[in-house]
Image: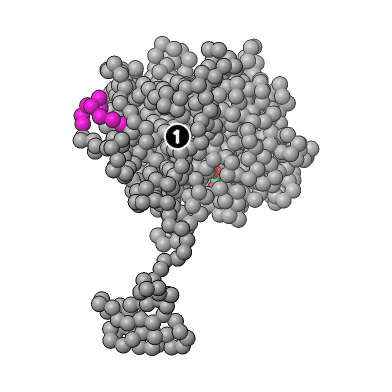
Amino acid sequence: MASNGSANSGSEEFTFSNGPGPVASSGRNGLPRIETHQKRHNGICHDDSSAPVKAQTIDELHSLQKKRSAPTTPIKDSAEPGTFSTLTEEERHKLQLQSISASLASLTRETGPKLVKGDPAKKSEAPNVSHVVHHVPTISVSDSALKFTHVLYNLSPAELYEQAIKYEKGSFITSTGALATLSGAKTGRSPRDKRVVKDETTGEELWWGKGSPNIEMDEHTFMVNRERAVDYLNSLDKVFVNDQFLNWDPEHRIKVRIVSARAYHSLFMHNMCIRPTPEELENFGTPDFTIYNAGQFPCNRYTHYMTSSTSIDLNLARREMIILGTQYAGEMKKGLFGVMHYLMPKRQILSLHSGCNMGKDGDVALFFGLSGTGKTTLSTDHNRLLIGDDEHCWSENGVSNIEGGCYAKCIDLSGEKEPDIFNAIKFGTVVENVVFDEHTREVDYTDKSVTENTRAAYPIEFIPNAKIPCVGPHPKNVILLACDAFGVLPPVSKLNLAQTMYHFISGYTALVAGTEEGVKEPRATFSACFGAAFIMLHPCKYAAMLAEKMLKHGATGWLVNTGWSGGSYGSGSRIKLQYTRKIIDAIHSGSLLNANYNKIDVFGLDIPTEVEGVPSEILDPKNAWSDKKAYQETLLKLAGLFKNNFEVFQNYKIGKDSKLTDEIVAAGPIF
Ligand SMILES: Nc1ncnc2c1ncn2[C@@H]1O[C@H](COP(=O)(O)OP(=O)(O)O)[C@@H](O)[C@H]1O
Ligand SMILES: C=C(OP(=O)(O)O)C(=O)O
Ligand SMILES: [Ca+2]
Ligand SMILES: [Mn+2]
């Protein structure tokens, strides 16, 4: 190589232009052979002097790398409190596998599948010693009774990263350490494909018919789909099993088991459900509810009640949920939310589709809203403690988060606008359907090539001021978030109780693009209790409980428009997040309670004349429209939609003397 270090022509000696440096002569392959000037004793150059590693083979070296997890504590014998019936580790694992096998049992057999704990691949990597049972690759067996299924039980995020990166195409690590995954053909919920088993009990208790999200299925068809899902899961080499909790209120905690076929699903639920301590896991026992997520496998379209190759089936009597034909992880989260909307009211606990945070003085605020209206964004507030971003219970003890994590929309996410959410996207977070630079792996949150419904699912502890445990006192402010695509609702209005009930039952908002399959742009929609897709009972039952609690605990109702102003979607502009945050700050501080108000016509809403940090001209929506005639027409159009929507609730009596119902109807628009 010429002395200037240019490409080696294969003939000359390589020398750096000055200084001793390494000297090279050309090797057989024409590349310079570098010889170091190591001290040489008797002709042999010695490696460094550190002690050799304590392993004879590479396999043995690898086996040094991971040490056994800390031993778990003995199980307390519930039969005789105070004594320890110390089960051995072996016996405990055996009990656990028996419980999981029972979960995965086809109901046409005596027993469940044969299960082995651990990754099947590990068996083939194990050192070639006699005591290891070699994992014979499973021939594709049609009868799951003839094979072993490996169970990957409550893996850690790191283990799940490895499983995803190794075995799940489309899994990548982003520049901030999150796991980027794809949810396949479905990137939002499929409400039309959701079914609920209608039996004697649920036929009476649940909300069916016009406006209800509950589409019936019979028990037999549920079992057909259950068999299909269980057969699919048992035909695999391995399944992921998560045993976790819902509801931070220890008095009303629900045990859930999620069986899934993807590391992405397991990590998503690891983040979104409450994570048990090792001790709690030992006492886990039989789950209160089980999800079988066979989402990669379609349902049979010829099966009765099916409307596509996707079916999400809920059987409240069996306490089971089946997912076929969709890999969108939000279906699991929302399916369990539906279960809580059924179980909690039975205990006189109000389940809520709301964000929730608490101020330093203990003032709790609820943020109700349908998907994409701002629950996660507005409940995540640097100056307040986050209790939860999406699903809560309001009991006699106060409020409690149902979940262990947050599920934030990522579209147009920026560190400037939403620093806490932005910074929560780190190792352990799942980001769904985002687009990133192929080299730097930096996520482009504005890119909606896959979907507008890009999401991040992270443990609530990733938010710096999360309140752990996620519980709080009775709410002081109940904020209804309406993302108004018509642009005629005021940015904020103070509600009396009847108005709060009216707007809670109406649940008016715009369903934003992507949340549900087929929604391409904001669509005005009415979603009772701001979460109709998930409620199981008649909306007026939840409304009656809300009224009773707001009255009892002196909470104030507010309606906040996080949607459009100065025109409808397409001509107006979305209200700036910074203005909405100022409005929410004024609600939290109590300053808005003492503001001066004007009543606007048609909806009869009380709007403040000023809010600190918000241009007064936008507070009365009419002022923000240049075309006043168009505003009036649009306002009346929306009022008509409200009236039509409310008709289905008109005759439902709330409260003892049903007085509340008449007042509630009177709280609607007058035109
Ligand atoms: N004025 C506003 N108020 C609240 N969110 C807004 C506003 N303008 C834009 N947004 C955006 O709307 C989205 C709300 O999403 P998110 O808070 O996750 O909704 P939800 O939790 O109700 O599903 C976020 O991307 C947020 O940045
Ligand atoms: C995932 C969801 O929750 P949200 O959009 O309310 O955050 C959903 O409603 O589908
Ligand atoms: Ca949310
Ligand atoms: Mn939600």
Q: Nearer the viewer, residue 326 or 175?
A: 175
Name the side, left or right, on which 152 lies relative to 571. left
The image shows residue 533, relative to residue 489, as above or below, that is above
Residue displayed at 47% across by 18% down: 206
Residue 305 in sight: no
Q: Quadrant of residue 668?
A: top right
Looking at the rendering, in which quadrant would you find the C terminus?
Answer: top right
Q: Does the magenta-highlighted stretch encompass residue 436?
A: no
Residue 417 visible somewhere in the drawing: yes
Q: Is residue 495 left or right of residue 178?
A: right
Image quadrant occupied by the N terminus = bottom left
User: Would you name the residue on which mark 1 appears?
Assistant: 154
220 relative to 451, above or below: above
Q: Tell whether 582 sits left or right of 221.
A: right
Residue 59 in picture, x, y percent from top left: 35, 48
Tell me which residue sits at (68%, 41%) in the image: 384
Looking at the image, the residue that sits furthest to the front is: 42
Q: Is 201 rendered above or below residue 227? A: above
The local crowd at label 1, few if under 14, some if 14 to 19, many if 20 or more residues have their Cα within 10 Å, is: many
Left or right of 585, for residue 314: left
Residue 653 quadrant = top right
Name which residue type carries label 1.
Answer: Asn
Residue 497 locus on image (x, y percent): 68, 26
State yes or no: residue 146 in magenta: yes
Of 283 and 438, which appears nearest the observer? 283
- Magenta residues? 141-149
* Residue 472 spot, x, y in % from top left: 67, 31
